Amino acid sequence: MGNNKLYPIFLKASKLDILIIGGGKVALEKLTFLLKSSPDAKVSLRAKWFLPEVVRLADNFGIDIKEEAYHSPQLKGRQLIIAATNDLAVNKRIVSDAQQENILINVADMPDLCDFYLGGIVTKGDVKIAISTNGKSPTLAKRLRQLLEEVLPNDIGLLADNLNRYRMQLKADLDIRVSKLNDLTEGLLSKKES
């Protein structure tokens, strides 16, 4: 059995310059996923052609979209690249160019070429949970996401807000605050189990 050694992080997509290269179904999926999680993401699209759905989504979010074949100058100033073309040779060229520029890259359905994966994400208010299968099964990540979306209450974000207010009221040092918050949340869980 493997061991997922990925390090999960949550990025402020509005502060990054993200480029999606591709205009078909996979690009639509990646763009939809990105905008669902980060509607204010700073993203651009480049491809020889675009599905009408991609164009509509880009227009709805004010995304920079240009019909043009891939060329390396498109990478200038970018921090994150998502290669979603249906051409393996182009995707490999994008990877090579991105690596030369030290830009993180994800290549759709090619985990070995990726610096990062786009896992399943559950969002309930300020609570966000990321799910990774180490690039092995996007379908499993999707099913786990659906399960968590059903199981977690919609107002769990309110709990996070209340715990944050309580945390801010505590004037104690870190160890005492952690202990008090642990006692409080443990009490919430034990009440629910009763």
Image (tube, rainbow, N blue to C red):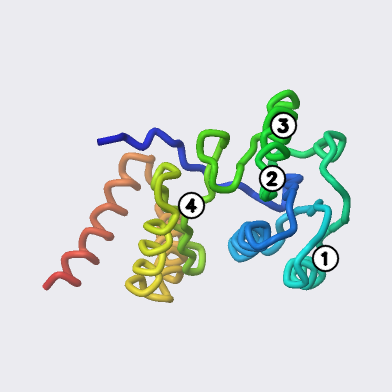
Crowding near pointer 1: few (<14 within 10 Å), some, many (20+)? Answer: few
Label placed on residue 119: 4
Say what secondary structure mark 1 lies in.
loop
Res 187 → quadrant:
bottom left
Q: Which residue is mark 1?
A: 62
Q: Earlier in the sequence, mark 3 or mark 4?
A: 3
Q: Residue at x 75, y 26 (%)?
A: 101
The kind of residue on which mark 4 rests is Gly
Check the image and name the residue furthest to the top.
100
Of residue 130 and residue 171, the one placed in the foreground of this image is: 130
> Does residue 100 lie above or below 186 as drawn?
above
User: How far separated are the C-alphas under marks 1 and 2?
Assistant: 27 Å
The circle drawn on residue 30 is: none
What is the x, y in percent for residue 90?
73, 39
Residue labelled with disc 3:
98
Q: Residue at position x 71%, y 56% from top?
A: 41
Q: Position of residue 159 (x, y in %)?
A: 40, 68
